[in-house]
Image (cartoon, helix red, strand yellow):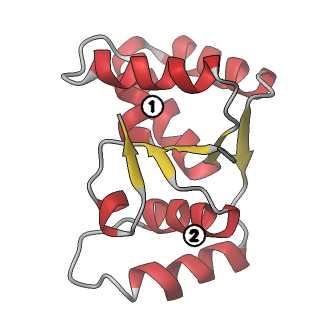
Amino acid sequence: MSGAFLDTSGWFAALSPKEARHKAALSAYRGLIERRVPLVTTNLVVTEMQILISRFRGAAEGVRFLDSLYQDPSHEVVFVDRDLERGAVDRWLRRFTDQHLSLADAVSFEVMRARRLRQALALDAHFELAGFELLP
């Protein structure tokens, strides 16, 4: 496997015991880590994760999450530039105008497409709609 994408929905469920799908998401996340699958996400997803963790566990935990993430070489954060964002809008948002996709989702799909990633740790069915496989 060339890697897997970390979406907010699956990643937060993996890290949050109170989430309904926590056990399945955590098992999938640990499995990726144990198999040393390269994990890819975007700074947009990181932003969503930090605010959720801060909201539910406090600001200090949000900062600890960021510190841990940026020290972990198995997690790559792709920073969104203008070209990536435009590609996401043109390829995904324009294609799925009948859906309520966020720009963060569209950028995630574009990163996955560009990197030839097939799997995403995600609970968001839009990933399947875009042609990707959900984990768990």
Q: Is residue 55 above or below residue 84?
A: above
Describe residue 78's horizontal placement relative to residue 136 as left or right: right
Which residue is at a point 38% across and 69% down the rendered structure image? 130
Q: Is residue 48 above or below residue 16?
A: below
Which residue is at a point 47% across and 41% down the rendered structure image? 48
Q: Label 1: which residue?
A: 11
Q: Please identify the quadrant where the C terminus is shown.
A: top left
Q: Label 2: which residue?
A: 110
Hey, which quadrant is residue 117 in on the image?
bottom right
Labels 1 and 2: the sequence-earlier one: 1
Q: Dot 2, how many residues are within 10 Å of its Cα: few (below 14), some (14-19), or many (20+)? A: many
Question: Which amino acid, mark 2?
Answer: Glu
Q: Residue 67 at what x, y percent from top left?
A: 72, 20
Question: Which amino acid, mark 1?
Answer: Trp
Of residues 135 and 80, the one drawn nearer to the viewer in this rendering = 135
Q: Residue 36 at what x, y percent from top left?
A: 70, 25
Q: Is residue 127 above or below residue 11?
A: below
Q: Dot 1, how many residues are within 10 Å of its Cα: few (below 14), some (14-19), or many (20+)? A: many
Q: Residue 91 at what x, y percent from top left?
A: 50, 84
Which residue is at a point 39% across and 67% down the rendered structure image? 131
